Image: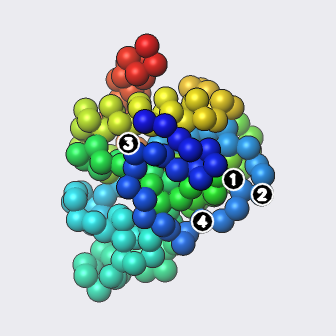
Amino acid sequence: MSIDTTTGLLTTAKYLSSPHCNTRDNTPIDMIVIHGISLPPREFGTGAIEALFCGKLDHAAHPYFRTIEGLQVSAHLLISRQGLITQFVPFHQRAWHAGQSTFQGKSNCNDFSIGIELEGTDDIAYEPVQYQRLAEVVTALLQAYPAITRERIVGHSDIAPGRKTDPGPLFDWAYLDCVLATCSA
Ligand SMILES: [Zn+2]
C-alpha cells in the first residue's frame, strides 16, 4: 500500500470524488484523526456513508437521514467492516471531518489533518481487519507525510471533547499500536 503524493491518492483504494473539500492553503499535513461512523446509526454496509460524503444521500430514504439534511461532510478515507478502503478526498486537499476542534492549542484541525473513518459505532468493537487496514494506511501516511508522528494520531473525541465521542471507548489504541509495529517491522 502506498501513496502517490502528486495525486494525493492511496494507490490501492477505490476513489469516489467528494465535493465536500477545499484547499489547505499550503498548511502542512501533520496529524491523523480517527473517526467512527455508521449510517443509519448501528447499520453497516448500507452505502449511505459513501452517498453522504459524495453529497448524494437520498434524505427521503430513512427517517434518520432527514435529521442530517444539509450536512456537508467528508473524510479522506473510509474503512468498511470488511476492510475495504474508499478514498473521497486527495490528501493534499482539506476534507470536512473534524468540525470545531482543537489539538495542542491549534484550532480547525481539518486544516492540517487527514481524516480516516472506520465503519462502526461507539459500543460495537471494530473488526480486526479494520485495524489491519488502518495500520497499513497509517504506515503509508507516515512515510508520505513525515511531519505526522504517532503522538499526532488521535481520535475525534480527543480534539472535540464533549461534542464528539467517536471512535468510541471500544476503539483499541494498544491493539492498533501492536498491528502498527508488525506493519513497520
Ligand atoms: Zn468523527
- Residue located farthest toward the top when viewing the structure as drawn: 185
* Within-10-Å neighbours for mark 4: few <14, some 14–19, many 20+: many
Contact, mark 4 vs mark 2 (Cβ under 8 Å) = no
* Disc 2: which residue: 25
Could you tell me which secondary element the residue under label 4 belongs to?
strand
Provide residue 181's location: percent of width, then percent of height: 42, 17
- Ligand 1 within 8 angstroms of badge 3 C-beta: no
Contact, mark 3 vs mark 4 (Cβ under 8 Å) = no
Provide residue 170's location: percent of width, then percent of height: 32, 36
Q: What kind of residue is marked 2? A: Asp
- Residue located farthest toward the right when viewing the structure as drawn: 26
Provide residue 91's location: percent of width, then percent of height: 59, 50
Q: Which mark is residue 168?
A: 3
* Disc 4: which residue: 21
* Within-10-Å neighbours for mark 3: few <14, some 14–19, many 20+: many
**Real-space Cα separation, disc 1 to disc 3, in angstroms:** 23 Å
- Nearer the N terminus, badge 2 or badge 3? 2
Q: Quadrant of residue 37?
A: bottom left
**Real-space Cα separation, disc 4 to disc 2, in angstroms:** 12 Å
* Disc 1: which residue: 111
**Real-space Cα separation, disc 3 to disc 4, in angstroms:** 25 Å
Q: Which mark is residue 58?
A: none
